Image (cartoon, rainbow, N blue to C red):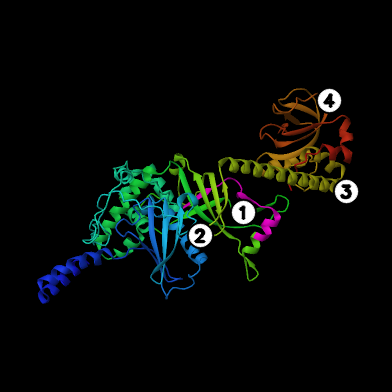
Amino acid sequence: MSQFHKSAFLWRYLICSGVAALALHPLVSKTAAAEPATFAHSRHHNVEIDFADPAARCAVTDLHLKMAITPESHDIGAVEQQIHLANALGRKLATDHQCAAVQSVDIAVIQNGSEARHLQATRGTNWQFAEVSASQPAPPAQPAAPFPPVPDALGAAAVTAPNAPAADAPAPTTSPAQAQDAAPSVPQQTPVVLPEGYMGLLALLVRHNPALLDNENIQTCWARHAFQRDFFAAQGNEFRKHEVENRAKADLTQISQQIPAGTLEANLAVRLGEYDFKQSSFPVALDGNVLTLSSSCDMSDTTVPGRVGLKLGETAPIFRLPMPAAEAEQFLKQRTRFGFINREMMAVLTFHVEDSQLDKMADNAPQPVTLTHVKIYSDTDKTSLLADIGPDALENMRKAQEAAKAAQQAKEAAEQQAENRRRMAERLQSASRSEKLAMWVGQNTHGFNTPDLNTMRSVRARTIMQGAPVDAILLVQADGSGRAQVPTKWPGKLNLTTPKDQPALASGTWYLVQGPVSVPEKGDFPAAEMTVQTLHACQQDQCKEAEDPQALLAALQPTVKP
């Protein structure tokens, strides 16, 4: 652009007189200085929002903008429409690294060439704009702090001249207060804007492993994110692309060094549940307990996965928006259009990721993280904050959900136990004596299939056919005492060995036993060996009392597997 003005000047100089040529100098300077710099553009309203100071742009604490409304603009004449459009800038102000120093914004609304009003907002109010009266002064613009020159990604150098008073303007006067304000001040540290989602995770991974900065794919990915316009404009020119990637590397280096260790944010669209009249609140539940962060970047030549799952506990978190019933009804009416209730909302989740987990990040391997903060907004543009849930509230919420889950599991277990006992009672009504006796020690070995007593003849035959020990349920009478290889009177030719967690056998006592039986291959009809796993000592001969269905039902284990 500067070359264009020099050519124009030379062309006019050859035609016009020297006086005309000298008069062209202020025109060139003013034309270059008046060149607008666009901060944002609304296609829907056909409105541009420009920097009031194109030279400083976002490198100020108090940002001044101009909203130019022309006859070609649409649906933007009302103050409410202008405020709604201004509020939409909050997302850009919160995520644009180049605007991290901005603490307040003043927008001068220009309608048909004249200044109509001012809209103002601050970072402390989450960039919620409001109209200010004409008597209320706009926040003073602060001079931009000097920055080292950064090469433009498009290869064009931005040239700006220092501000100077006009030739016919009176000499400025400086008051003592102004002189004190003009004194050099200590430069403020630029606040860090935390990248969200996958890019925030990438910054954490680089913080954990700085060697990733030298990977070209990671530089390219960050350039697409942080310098999107310059990145795509530089495609096809390897030199400009190289400049943008170097800027991305420097930016990622700074961000990764300044972000809090282990802190990660993610914006997530959520849905407002139906109002809970018992708890006087709206539930907002996440769709599952694993949050997936993914990227469209090519990470094939890196150790960084392109898709990562974050596990938020064992169950999906449920957040609550407390609200009285009458207020909740009005809240839903305000969100109703043509009979449809808009329940879509935006949640900003903040997690803590341990350094040890960063080494384990891999595709399809969810890593456990701790949810530390949640903010829920009324819409996807995050214009109105509905809930701000801190660490203490989240911890109480987790405890309440765990208690509710435990209570539900206990209820389900009790219902299952009652169902098992009901089925057992039905089976016992038609069970044979052999089946009743076998159920004292075999109710968990056959599920809902009724077990039965075995005979030694059938047991020996099965061991010979299978060539391995077989499981059996037997009615026996001990012919000795102890734990190891205790002989039996009934059925005979059977030795019993009980583990230490089972009581020792007593001679003459009748037992119901269950366990594997083996038969030695050598010898003339050797005694079988049984390792007892479950036993029941009877009070009467041949376990007569064990035939009682009520006694059996009361003694049976409640956790029979279905």
Real-space CA distance between mark 1 and mark 4, rounded to the nearest whole angstrom: 67 Å
Q: Which amino acid type is shown beneath numbered disc 3?
A: Ser
Q: Which amino acid type is shown beneath numbered disc 4?
A: Gly
| Residue 161: quarter of image | bottom left
Q: Earlier in the sequence, mark 4 or mark 3?
A: 3
x then y, percent, for residue 335: 61, 63
Local SS, label 2: loop
Real-space CA distance between mark 4 and mark 3, rounded to the nearest whole angstrom: 31 Å
Is the residue marked by circle 2 packed among few (<14), some (14-19), or many (20+) residues within 10 Å? some
Dots 1, 4 in contact, CB < 8 A: no
Q: Which residue is disc 2 drawn over? A: 381
Closer to the camera: disc 2 or disc 4?
A: 2
Q: Nearer the viewer, residue 52 or 489?
A: 52
Real-space CA distance between mark 2 and mark 4, rounded to the nearest whole angstrom: 83 Å
Tell whether position 376 is magenta.
Answer: no
Real-space CA distance between mark 3 and mark 1, rounded to the nearest whole angstrom: 52 Å
x then y, percent, for residue 26: 20, 65
Q: Which mark is residue 430?
A: 3
Q: Which amino acid type is shown beneath numbered disc 1?
A: Val
Span highlighted in magenta in the image: 307-330
> What's the residue at 47%, 40% (across, down)?
354
Q: Which mark is residue 284?
A: 1
Above or below, 483 relative to 400: above
Real-space CA distance between mark 2 and mark 1, rounded to the nearest whole angstrom: 18 Å
